[in-house]
């Protein structure tokens, strides 16, 4: 199950810079491509606002 980014995202880019597969896309709120995400959790660990969690 891919991780997801909620609306507390401040688009700081920290998650994008640590993603090993490049699954995170820029925007007002960043988004994770579920087809590219390998469910490693690196982005969630790096997120300063806690905006990233495992998807359901």
Image: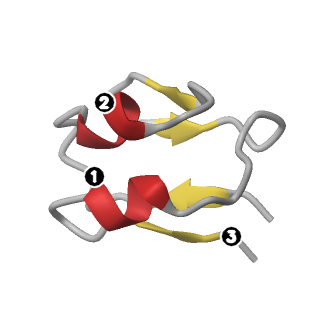
State whether residue 5 is above or below residue 35: below
Q: Are marks 3 and 1 in contact (CB under 8 Å)?
A: no
Q: Residues within 10 Å of mark 1 (few under 14, many from 20)?
A: some
In the rendered structure, find residue 22 and report the number of the disc placed on it.
Answer: none
In the rendered structure, find residue 9 and report the number of the disc placed on it.
Answer: 1
Position in image of residue 17 (x %, y %): 32, 29
- Residue 12 falls left or right of residue 37: left
Q: Residue at x 76, y 44 (%)?
A: 34
Position in image of residue 6 (x %, y %): 43, 61
Q: Earlier in the sequence, mark 1 or mark 2?
A: 1
Residue that badge 3 annotates: 55
Q: Are marks 3 and 2 in contact (CB under 8 Å)?
A: no
State whether residue 25 is above or below residue 3: above
Secondary structure of the residue carrying tag 3 is: loop
In this rendering, the label closer to the viewer, 3 or 2: 3
Q: CA distance from mark 3 to mark 2?
A: 20 Å
Position in image of residue 16 (x %, y %): 38, 32
| Quarter of the figure that contains the N terminus | bottom right
Q: Residue at x 16, y 36 (%)?
A: 12
Task: Name the foreground residue: 27 vs 24.
Answer: 24
In the rendered structure, find residue 28 and report the number of the disc placed on it.
Answer: 2
Secondary structure of the residue carrying tag 2 is: loop
State whether residue 2 is above or below residue 19: below
State whether residue 30 is above or below residue 42: above
- Residue 53 falls left or right of residue 13: right
**Which residue is farthest bottom?**
56
Q: Give the colour scheme of this rendering.
A: secondary structure
- Residue 22 falls left or right of residue 33: left
Q: CA distance from mark 1 to mark 2?
A: 8 Å
């Amino acid at each position: 199950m891919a991780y997801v980014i909620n609306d507390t995202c401040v688009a700081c880019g920290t998650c994008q810079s640590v993603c090993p597969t490049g699954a995170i896309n820029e925007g007002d709120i960043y988004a994770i491509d579920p087809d590219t995400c390998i469910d490693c959790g690196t982005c969630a660990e790096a997120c300063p606002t806690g905006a990233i969690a495992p998807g359901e």
